[in-house]
Amino acid sequence: MSVIIFLVLGLIVGSFLNVVIYRLHSEEGGIVSGRSHCRRCNNDLRWIDNIPLISYIFLCGKCRYCKKPISWQYPMVELMCCFAFVLALVGSGRFISENASLGYGIAGLTATVFAAMIVIFVYDLKYMEVPMIAIWIGVIASIATIGVITLGFFQGVEFFGLPAFLHALSGAMAFLFFFLLSYLSDETWMGYGDGFIALVIGLLLGPLATFVAIVVAVWLGTIVGLSLVIFGSKGMKSAIPFGPFLVGGMFVSYAIGIFAPHWLSVLW
């Protein structure tokens, strides 16, 4: 039952995140004010057109009014958020089994971090910019997550079973590493925003899993970058945002920590 609830919540929050991503960039009204509308024909959308994922499927990926294609971003973000919420629930299962109320609180806080990181993933990919409001939400939710775990006195937890100060140190070191890369290269290697993304990852995951997340991000970035160059989509000097790879590395490292924690030490 909990899985179904988190699935539905993920779809609903994912639909909201699409609005956030669009309005953060367009500065069109408030994030939570104003009705949703088609960006091409400007018609207001009815509630039946806004059912996460289901409306996209039944409308065959086209606007009901102008019949123009709806961006793949919308179902993609909804599905990403759906799976991220379930991952947060599964990752918190060990806490839920010891203390249900605190455990579900940890799942909710982790899901909040994941939602913020999904906004960063899409926004940086589209606009080559990291929205700081998502960063600060991620930082606050990460600190709250580790705080609840530390104050909850959970025993025998391997993935998050580290003192809070090590998570803080991990976040600071990850931030400093990317900040120095950005500063020394005048942002030609990395942007300062990548340092803030690394800060959130370090705070949430701790040192070992953060290191693995960064290694995975570098692998992913190298593979995708070389593929784009080889197939002619990008040149050797083309700018490619690294933030989405850091976010991808975080999810991979988190999943490894849940389903195959022994691989964390192998990858280290």
Image (cartoon, helix red, strand yellow):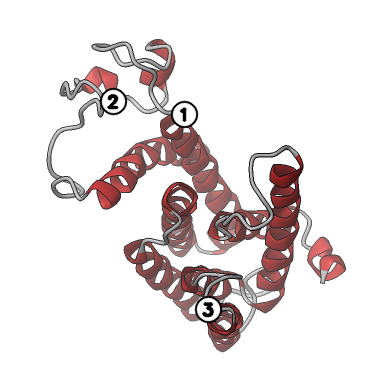
Residue sitting at x 74%, y 66%: 215
Residue 263 drawn at (x, y percent): 83, 61
Residue 44 drawn at (x, y percent): 15, 24
Residue 252 drawn at (x, y percent): 68, 54
Residue pointed to by mark 3: 186
Identify which residue, 29 or 81, lies in the foreground: 29
Residue sitting at x 59%, y 50%: 90
Toward the right, the furthest residue is 266
Residue pointed to by mark 2: 50
First in residue order: circle 2 vs circle 3: 2
Q: CA distance from mark 1 to mark 2?
A: 15 Å
Label 1: state its secondary structure. Answer: loop
First in residue order: circle 1 vs circle 2: 2
Residue pointed to by mark 1: 72
**Whether residue 47 is situated above or below residue 177 in the rendered picture:** above
Label 2: state its secondary structure. Answer: loop
**Whether residue 185 is situated above or below residue 104 in the rendered picture:** below
Identify which residue, 92 or 54, lies in the foreground: 54
Which kind of residue does numbered mark 3 sit on? Asp
Identify which residue, 225 or 72, lies in the foreground: 225
Identify which residue, 98 or 9, lies in the foreground: 9
| In this picture, residue 12 sits left or right of residue 222 | left
How many neighbours does mark 2 have within 10 angstroms: few (below 14), some (14-19), or many (20 or more)?
A: some
Which kind of residue does numbered mark 2 sit on? Asn
